[in-house]
Amino acid sequence: FVSGSSGHADQHRLRMRARVRPRHVELSAAAGDVAQSWELRRDHMILPAARIVTPSGTQGTAFIVSQTPENGTYVLTNHHVIKDCIQQNDRWDPVGKSSQKVEQLLAVNVETFRYDEYGRHLQTVVTSADIVAYSVYGDKWSFEGDLALLKLKAPVEGLPAARLIGEETYLKEVRMLDDIVMVGCPDGSHLPLPTTGHVASLSEERSGVGLLLSQVFGNPGSSGSAVYRFSEDRGRYEVIAIHSMIDGRGSLTDVGRGCFLRLAIQVPEIYEFLRRHGYGYLVEFEDEQEEKPEAEVEKEKEAEVEAVAEKAANETSGDTSNATAASAAPPEEEPGNASQDEPGNASQDEPVS
């Protein structure tokens, strides 16, 4: 026999047990969420990261900007990271009896990385790459964007490309104090290292080129690092800028090391750079509600073909040099060194030699 009050109490306990999830079920669900979160970060930020090593020993960072079976693998970095691979040689023209400058582009080594399911390094793959387009770093009066696009001579399979935020989306969504992650190879690190911080300013510029100021720690070698921001709407990490130089206002020393304020080239400038050199079709335009018109994509591909044909026409017989889409020659600076601005102004990273 069970009294009325006792019976009601037992029924209440049974209902509560049915509502409460067992502890092991909660832990299992939490572990699944953590694993999914790690896989998202790995695929969106860690796997696209690459390390640049030039023949002279200069080291920097890059990231995979496009990876398709049709087009191959492209990585984006800074011009000042690979500038010592862009050489201007004198060639004598016996017909015109004059000397003319001929540009020669040296190959660059690009290192990509593979990891196990926990993020432990498994393999480093070294692939030679050609410089296919660049805009010179210059100085604070002639800054053209400090970007360089490289095409790997052999596609790297199994690695995803980073996703760029759309131009319009960047202008509408990115705000001061947004959390960011920068993935780079500071101090010649043999593996990419992620560091976190936030957007400090969206109002910086140099020679009319828009720059994003971030509060994120780094050292020489971080140049070319992708700056990521998570989009809750799209559920992914997106590149909002590419790190280019340090800002002297955040330097902890007077030799360009230990800086927590960094200037990066904003995504709209990256899109413009790719379009200007005929490679706009490599990236997806996320700021449009519908896919980019096929006719426009074909037009950009035709522009690239014409640019390549024009380069080939300008090459003389026996010339082993390549041509670039850049509009100006790089400044005369010693490989591995970088110009330092006045205290309080932005200063370029010194690539590690």
Image: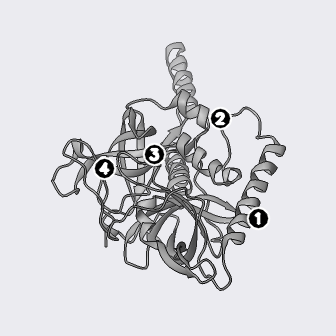
- Which amino acid lies under the numbered mark 2 shown in the image of this protein? Asp
Q: Residues within 10 Å of mark 4 (few under 14, many from 20)?
A: many
- Which amino acid lies under the numbered mark 3 shown in the image of this protein? Ile
Query: Is 108 left, or right, of 293 in this rendering?
Result: left
Judge depth for marks 1 and 4 and give the one in front.
Answer: 4
Can I make out residue 264 in this image?
Answer: yes
Disc ID at residue 246: 4
- Which amino acid lies under the numbered mark 1 shown in the image of this protein? Glu
Query: Is 52 left, or right, of 278 in this rendering?
Result: left
Disc 2 or 3, which lies upstream in sequence? 3
Disc 1 or 4, which lies upstream in sequence? 1
Kindly report the distance in space between the C-alpha atoms of the residues bearing marks 3 and 4. 12 Å
Kindly report the distance in space between the C-alpha atoms of the residues bearing marks 3 and 1. 28 Å
Quarter of the image for the C terminus: give it. bottom left
Q: Are marks 3 and 1 in contact (CB under 8 Å)?
A: no
* Residue 263 on image: x %, y %: 36, 45
* Residue 216 on image: x %, y %: 32, 46
* Residue picked out by circle 1: 70
Judge depth for marks 3 and 1 and give the one in front.
Answer: 3
* Residue picked out by circle 3: 265
Quarter of the image for the N terminus: give it. top right
SS assignment at label 4:
strand
The image quadrant that residue 234 belongs to is top right
